[in-house]
Image (tube, grey):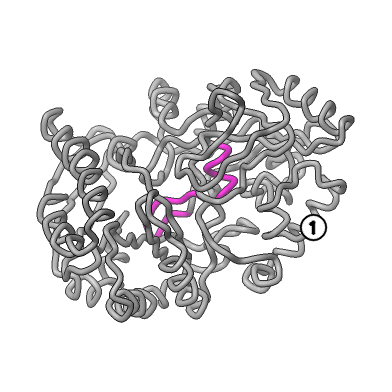
Amino acid sequence: MTRPGGRWQNWGRSESVRPRRVEFPRTADAVQRAVVAAAAQGLPIKAVGAGHSFTGIAVAPGVLLDLSDLSGLVSVDVERSRVTFRAGTRLHQVPALLAPYGLAMENLGDIDRQSISGAISTGTHGTGSRFGGIATQVVGATLVTASGELLVVDETENADLVPAVALGLGALGILVEVTIQCVPAFVLHAVEQPEALDAVLDDLEARVAAADHFEFYWFPHTDRAMTKTNTRLPESAPRHPLSPVGKWVDDTLVGSGLHQVACSVARTIPATIPLINRVSVKMWGDREFTDASSRVFATSRSVRFREMEYALPVENVRPAFDALRSLVDEKGWRISFPVEVRFAAADDRWLSTAHGRASGYIAVHRYWREDPTEYFEAVEKIMLGFDGRPHWGKMHTLDASILRERYPRFDDFVALRDRLDPDRLFQNPYLERVLGG
């Protein structure tokens, strides 16, 4: 988000910059003009959405294009359930836009504050072994290239580029429209409950295979996991949503208010963390409800944190998680935020963390006022040993020399970048690190 005085900072407060200029385009034409002007002035230009990436992927030291005003529905192909959005549309706005057509997005992550272009460009994903990340739902896009021209990528034009552009890291151009393959609206039956961690781990493969969407959280220093199992039902299925009071108690009072207090206390008195985590496991979850898919997928996250997440071949999730548990015990750290484990199907997006392999994700977090460096770097070492790929929008230390070895289409992506942005108009320090100069 852009602050008074022109300083931009991301949600996690891990990145900030004071750009030379900030613009708020409302149309694709305005984006084209901004790109041409930036090129003429020799200034790099970057688009930003909601600032929910923890890396510097959206940092814009030259011209910052805030896409907040480039928002809304462009068109709907009712017969094929395909919907085109302007790039700055926030994910939380999408359900209301799709409702009149009886449609929904196939899968979502657990945060819906991001812009749709930012979510696909960083590889945002949800959970479910039969479902890919949000970028896999992309069937078309329009972007402004470094020459200021519009490039249309869909099944009829430049179809071979869809797997690259759908998850392009903002390196190929500035997205102005995105076409999503939607599905008929559906509801989710959600079961959230605390369970014995060892029982969850011992039965993990079966749980993941049996459920439409399964994930679990582990609070360090406890032997409990909070599991979330969501089952897809037709839109006509009876709904039993959480009561407004119950939802407020769980998500706002406990999930946000008390968790904020707990993090503040834990930061001041680290010795209290094991007790706080044991209490948190007992207070969170243990509920069952049925509601519209978007209301179940997304949760409110008002406690600020920083995050690192690695995608692993699904068979490596259990040994990597066990190594992480041992690490926390060996180091004697006090970790107040839970570890999150999710799953996704293999896909064909060139730079997807699930490219070519069914994947499991292990995410670690630290309260934003705590230094995550030692914890994250030690966990990263474990993840790399299990063939991990880092989430592009979450903190990691890798560069192009290492990432090239982990993505079969890495050099193809770089070659496309050379063609579309030979002078690196869309470059910033993060992209230079992860893709090379």
> Within the magenta stretch, is there residue 121?
yes
> Within the magenta stretch, is there residue 363?
no
Q: Residue at x 45, y 51 (%)?
A: 125
| Residue 45, percent from left and from top | 74, 36
| Residue 196, percent from left and from top | 14, 69
**Which quadrant holds the C terminus?**
bottom right
Reading the image, the residue beneath label 1 is 437
Rendered view: 303 above or below 203: above
Frontmost residue, 345 versus 331: 331
Rendered view: 209 above or below 327: above
| Number of numbered markers | 1
Q: Residue at x 45, y 73 (%)?
A: 378
Q: Quadrant of residue 308?
A: bottom left
| Residue 417, percent from left and from top | 79, 51
| Residue 64, percent from left and from top | 67, 32
Disc 1, SS: loop
